[in-house]
Image (spheres, rainbow, N blue to C red):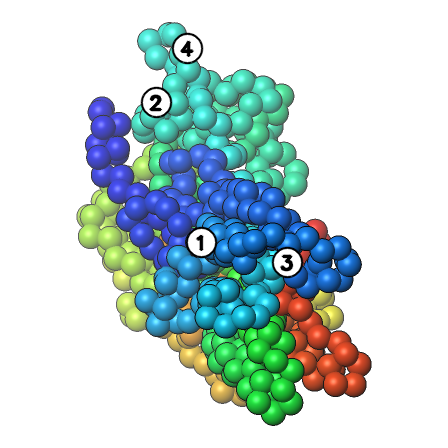
Amino acid sequence: MNSHDHRLQNEKVLYTCPMDPDVVSETSGECPKCGMELVPVDMAARGSEHAGHGAEGSFKRRFFITLPFVLLITALSQNIEQWLKFGFTFPGQGFVLFLIGTFIYFYGGAPFFKAAKGEISHKNPAMMTLVAFAITVAYGFSIAATFLFPGASLYWEMSTLISVFLLGHWLEMRAVRGATGSLMELAKLIPPLAHLIKDGNIKDLETSKLVIGDVVLVKPGEKIPVDGKVISGESAVDESMITGESRPVAKKTGDSVIGGSINQDGSLTVEVSKTGSNTAIAQIMELIRKAQASKPNVQYLADRAAAVLFYVAVAAGAASFVFWYFVSPQGAIFAATAAVAAVVVACPHALGLAIPTVTSVTSTLGAKNGILIKDMKGLEIARKLNYVVFDKTGTLTKGEFGISAVVLAKQSMAGDENQLLQMAAAVEMSSQHSIARGIVNEAKNRNLETQNIGNFKSFPGRGASAEVDRKDVAVGNDKLMEELGVRIPENLFIKDKKAGTTVYVSVNNVFAGAILLKDVVREESKRAVVELHRLGVKTAMLTGDTADVAETVGKEIGIDTVFAQVLPEDKVNKVKELQHRGNVVAMVGDGVNDAPSLTQAHVGIAVGAGTDVAVESADIVLMKNNPLDVVKAISLSRKTNAKMEQNLAWATGYNVFAIPIAAGVLYPSLHILLRPEWAALLMSASSVIVVFNALLLRKTRLD
Ligand code: ADP
Ligand code: MG
């Protein structure tokens, strides 16, 4: 086995922006849109890297390097000297100011110019374009004042503006890194080294170099490096970081373990079963990344608002200049200062951050609670749900069928009970249904021999058939028997028919017997229904099982609406039916035949990281098989939306006050004018507030 080299060759790394996953690049570097450091898309193999450190560092460096020059320019500026009543002038002062100002403009302004260029080339002038525009206006005006007409320059204003912008971006990126670091946090769960057992020796090997079939030793207290199967040893494993389940899970030979979980007291020998991007952690990371890339609808609203605000900013700037220069003349300096301040304060930066910061925090918070959000749009709607439809088997019930009785037909072709079970089990070996697993397990427990079969056929929602020992054997419900023309005797005595699911067995199209199976209702199902009712959400149950069983289970749990004997292809119609009655519907299911209804529902929720198809069709995936997590998901949705609304309200609302003040409406009456550097400070503060507000969500509890 030499798949190491193979893997390395095939690994083509793409880079993306932690703030805007639409950005995909084949090379690392800074984001063309926002200037943030790009991070590898497939971080699974990479381990811990810090998002945004590069750009963050660049802002920090430029801030500190320009700071002494900004102070120098401040000391040399005429207005400051006037205010502080100390004068010192020297010949060529204007030219010195010009030199220092030029350095600050080009060195300090560089990240903004670069990002502005990116924005303009994407035909999406925004924040950075405004910043670049504002400092360029101030710089251009100052050059003119130095060389073309005698007058005071704006070097000082321009420099402090740049300084504040650099500081603001540095601080903000630090905060954003906190919000987006979740993927890196997950990657860090994987220990870099594993103890490989080979030819009786133990040697340490990089985790990324393990291949399927390798055997590793996990000592007490260590993290399990990859997904695998225990081949010897016994221990308890803390899987909370992956499944959200807080109790440690007992592991013995034959059990599966997940890479990234923490081994507790015992030592385990584990055979590697999955590596690289197939491991649970890598797939969770991929899901989170997709979730962060999926935009909730309010994002589009925010983006449109930001685009409008750009033009508002430019218009406000132009209007202030025109007004203070021509209409109510206060001189060119005053007019230019007000214009720059208005442009700066209107930068739609906070608006751009309002939603993405919340979505990244939300997806992490969800993941920590065992809720993986695949599509933010689904989570966005989840707060409005008023009907949750649950699949019965495996979702509301445990899906672990036990056999409670076997009934033989008179003169059965099966001979005795065990022979009937043996034949049924032979057919069910090839079926994925939880009923099938129940029958096969019972046959195993009774030490019945396995028989070979041919010509297996599956009838979704009805049963299965095959050729066993040259006889046609069918196992399924009354519908299947009807289809095959098998007559079920009227007087067939089945004790307590409502308590379980009856499965009939026919041999060569003649009724041979029946098997009574019992599934157990999950304790959490009842609580979930109670909680949902408290939130004003109605519940429905969807099952292919008989009305008798469905009613019994439905009553026990307290379900509002029961749909029984629904064929797999009709499940989707039941969801549609509820939708047509004006409900906002979530579908919760795990199986292959739930996929269409998961897609049809407003919110599709797959449980237990069930079948791949179900996971693929869902908006939200619950790691644990716990219906209570549906309630948590709704609560997460409500909290997320509240945060988004707060952020949007703040980010747009602040402009309503700030722009007019910056433009000078308070100047005539109160002599209040927002200086450009104060405008920059205010603008940065509003962004930082938005980010911190999003971060507050991290500490929320969902239950
Ligand atoms: P659910 O909607 O409860 O998940 P399905 O739609 O998968 O159930 O199946 C509906 C019914 O069809 C089951 O209750 C059972 O009676 C029958 N059935 C389906 N598959 C099988 C099988 N492999 N063996 C026996 N009976 C089956
Ligand atoms: Mg099912």
Q: Residue furthest right?
A: 670
Please name the residue that numbered disc 3 is placed on: 77
Q: Which mark is residue 214?
A: 2
Q: Are marks 3 and 4 in contact (CB under 8 Å)?
A: no
Seen at 71% across and 56% down, the residue is 87
- Vertical comparison of 346 with 618: above or below: below
Q: Is residue 587 left or right of residue 43?
A: right
Please name the residue that numbered disc 1 is placed on: 106
Query: Looking at the image, is mark 1 or mark 4 nearer the viewer?
Result: 1
Q: State the SS at label 4.
A: strand
List x then y, in percent, for residue 97: 54, 55
Q: Amino acid at mark 2?
A: Asp
Q: Are marks 4 and 2 in contact (CB under 8 Å)?
A: no
Q: Amino acid at mark 1?
A: Phe
Q: State the SS at label 3.
A: loop
Q: Residue furthest top?
A: 200
- Vertical comparison of 120 with 307: above or below: above
List x then y, in percent, for residue 235: 58, 24
Query: Looking at the image, is mark 1 or mark 2 nearer the viewer?
Result: 1
Ranked by sequence position, the earlier of labels 3 and 4 is 3
Q: Is residue 326 left or right of residue 415?
A: right
Q: State the SS at label 1.
A: helix
